[in-house]
Amino acid sequence: MSRSIVRQSKFRHVFGQAVKADQCYDDIRVSKVTWDSSFCAVNPKFLAVIVESSGGGAFLVLPVHKTGRVDKNYPLVVGHSGPVLDIDWCPHDDNILASCSEDCTAMVWQIPDHTLTRPLSDPVVVLEGHSKRVGIVSWHPTARNILLTAGSDNLIIIWNVGTGEPLLSMDDHPDLIYSISWNRNGSLFCTTCKDRRLRVCDPRKREVVAERLAPHEGIRPMRAIFTRDGNIFTTGFTRMSQRELGLWDPTNFEEPIALLELDTSNGVLLPYYDADANMVYLCGKGDSSIRYFEVTDEPPYVHYLSTFSSKEPQRGMGFMPKRGVDVTKCEIARLFKLHDKKCEPITMTVPRKSDLFQDDLYPDTAGPEPAMEPEEWLDGRDEDPILVSMREGYIPPKSRDCSPPLTFLSFLSSPSSYHCPFFLSSFPLFLLFAFLSSQPQLLERLLEEIQNLKATVLSQEKRICDLENKLSQYTNGTD
């Protein structure tokens, strides 16, 4: 009897599937800037996409559940005076997002839970320290308020965004930095650079602790990410311009753990890593496919699983944190594929017959709670992410929204839903104002709604006047 040579893996049959058309985000003018970032960032609450805009840089932020056609007048986040090059959601607060731009700055934004009614132009903090465009922003995985930026001045700066001050800087790179990835506890990060070197850096010692010249022999851009066990996964090109991937042990850079040639396409391969499943999704710019692999500690170490293919090429890609996937459907990953004018979610699912929670697919995952403060990290402390259980199940995005849509009438008729006495509507006005002044967010939303109502009334008034004029012309003509 012959022995089976098929490798056993619970992820061997993972399949990708695009969502239905009405669950896409349509009429988004994705940025055309020539920069190899993903142009998209997503978390369980929001989708952010860098878009084309006149007069500077802008990006669009939508609640994840707000699918369908996006109004062309939908308010943007506009604060940069040059094109936005990269965006990254804070892992410890789903309402905080960092952006960087050709205007040599990085900015940190607080995105409100309620839908924007006017452009957001005031960042929480502006980080000024680079002399050339800033192309990379990346939050520390476990320490609160620590943000890394890298610019075309070949400088890496690590900031405390709580104070707006730079904590550390490194100028060890002689050329343009292509990518940066923190390791699991944020004690190290790895970089790829135009000088064809892969480096491992210890930011608190301000030194490069390991490096490898030409992990991929081609001269085109490389990408590198840390895996859960401390190895480094890379993508790049061979001398003959074939795309390839590699797996490296940073304590011994002499030989790769694995090196695998893929194809002859030109697009840079952007790797997205799922630390819980130890899987890597490769999305090539300009490709119409997503390949995915499992990384294990047994030969050949990087195992090809399958490819999701579609007809249209991708301009960029967003990767949902594990907290945002639907455990009731055995969804283990969700990618947000950018087309020229829309964003299309793609779900990655493990086929299972049981409706019960699948423990083996969902180990405890990194939660939103930071493991330490900036000062502790700066003093040399290292902590792994604080994990949360996925057993509670998927919370639909609509119920994650902190509050239902507020209208002035609903506020008066149902004040109990806003944690105030049911008879508030019969209160004297001075008490109503006293209550509102103690609820600044609520007051701001009410004022916005009043402005909207005022605009609607004015537009209707104008329409009625126009109709009356037309009617009087008609009646005068018939006389």
Image (cartoon, grey):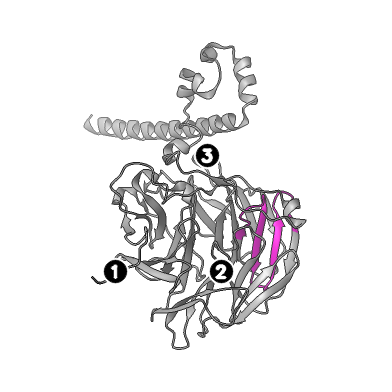
| Residue 219 seen in render | yes
Residue tagged 1: 4
Instruction: Give me the residue at 45% from left, 47% from top.
Output: 324
Amino acid type at mark 1:
Ser
Magenta highlight range: 138-166
- Relative to 440, is 466 on the left or the right? left
- The location of residue 21, given as percent across then percent down, is 29, 51
348 shown above or below 247: above
Q: Earlier in the sequence, mark 3 or mark 2?
A: 3
Decide if residue 81 is in sight here: no
Q: From what the image shows, is residue 294 above or below residue 360?
A: below
Q: Which one is in front in this view, the residue at disc 2 or the one at disc 1?
A: 1
Q: Secondary structure at mark 2?
A: loop
Instruction: Identify which residue, 477 or 55, lies in the foreground.
Output: 55
The residue that disc 3 covers is 113
Label 3 secondary element = loop
Looking at the picture, does residue 427 appear above or below residue 192?
Answer: above
Q: Nearer the viewer, residue 89 or 140?
A: 140
Of badges 3 and 1, the one in the foreground is: 1
Kind of residue at disc 3: Asp
* Residue depicted at 72% across the width and 63% down the height: 129
- Quadrant containing the N terminus is bottom left
Label 3, label 1: how far apart the Cα atoms are = 53 Å
Q: Which residue is mark 2?
A: 231
